[in-house]
Image (tube, rainbow, N blue to C red):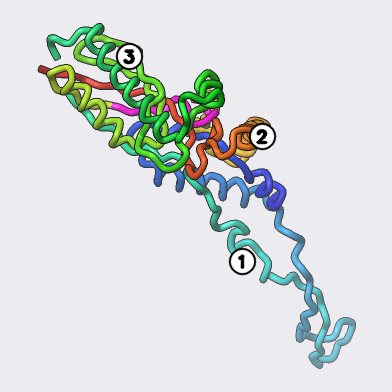
Amino acid sequence: MGSSGLARLQGLFAVYKPPGLKWLHLRETVELQLLKGLNASVKPPAPKQRVHFLLGPAEGSEEKKLTLTATSVPTLTTHRLVRGPAFTSLKIGVGHRLDAQASGVLDHVTRELLDRILAIIQGSHQKALVMYSNLDLKSQEAYQMAVQGVIRPMNKSPMLISGIRCLHFAPPEFLLEVQCMHETQQQLRRLVHEIGLELRTTAVCVQVRRTRDGFFRLDDALLRTQWDLHSIQDAIQAAAPRVAAELKKNLRLRLGHQPLPSAGQPCGSKDPSSTLGVESSVGP
């Protein structure tokens, strides 16, 4: 079970990070749970036997003469308490890291004014997206890619927002949904601050929550109670067809639009698009 269980861990899976938990601690916790499950699944081999000579009186003899008697005893060098656990470390990579949250603290701000600011932000970022994609906007190919929504930056770029909208508005708090790529949480918090300046007030990001990473959604993310060997193996198996389909789609788009970037993974970039919920507060 040990080697086969390890083979089933080759792949991708999503984990839900609770607020306040650092990503490094999350990774270490997942690794610890996986090692615990792998080592528990390893059945210890039957101990090898070795010949040992015991000194004692000869059997069936009344004489006090000592003799050596050959006997078979187990070898303890392969015992778990002597050798230690079979698995001591795993290579676990973290795709997109999330940090802890911030906190913050309105007045004359209206929903219409906020929506107007968000539309301006989205428009400016869409122009930047086209610029970084190196597309000729007059070409039929660029038009088709825009219709399909597969325009991606050709190379490394700053944070680009493909969509932003307000999901909940209850002053002094509001919730934004941001579809973006190449983002960091610090940039998203700065975005909220800049929105506050555009609204002629102050705004502070209270919480950032990623709801989609590539094709992984919240329903795919393993909760803390599921950070164990079998749950992660099942998650990897369940995601494998979608991973293969995404790779095939990217390859098809890349071959069909060379040297244009693919839909799911821009050329020269490791970051697929993400959708994040940003909870904020504004003040006068």
Tell me the SS state at disc 1: helix
- The residues tagged by marks 1 and 3 sit, at their Cα atoms, a distance apart of 58 Å
Tell me the SS state at disc 3: strand
Q: For residue 249, which numbered disc appears in the image?
A: none
* Amino acid residing under circle 2: Lys
- Which residue is tagged 1? 83
Q: Quadrant of the C terminus?
A: top left
Q: Is residue 186 above or below residue 43?
A: above
Q: Residue at x 33, y 28 (%)?
A: 208
* Amino acid residing under circle 3: Cys
* Amino acid residing under circle 1: Arg
Q: Nearer the viewer, residue 84 or 75?
A: 84
- Comparing labels 1 and 3, the label whose residue is closer to the camera: 3
Q: Residue at x 33, y 19 (%)?
A: 176
Tell me the SS state at disc 2: helix
- Which residue is tagged 2? 248
Q: Residue at x 82, y 83 (%)?
A: 69
- Return the residue found at the far left: 284
Bounds of the magenta span? 207-217
Of mark 1 and mark 3, the one earlier in the sequence is 1
Q: Nearer the viewer, residue 74 or 101?
A: 101
- The residues tagged by marks 2 and 3 sit, at their Cα atoms, a distance apart of 34 Å
Instruction: Estimate how packed mark 2 is, as few (under 14), some (14 to 19) or many (20 or more) residues with alpha carbons within 10 Å.
Output: few
- Which residue is tagged 3? 166
Give the x, y percent position of residue 25: 40, 45
Of mark 1 and mark 2, the one earlier in the sequence is 1
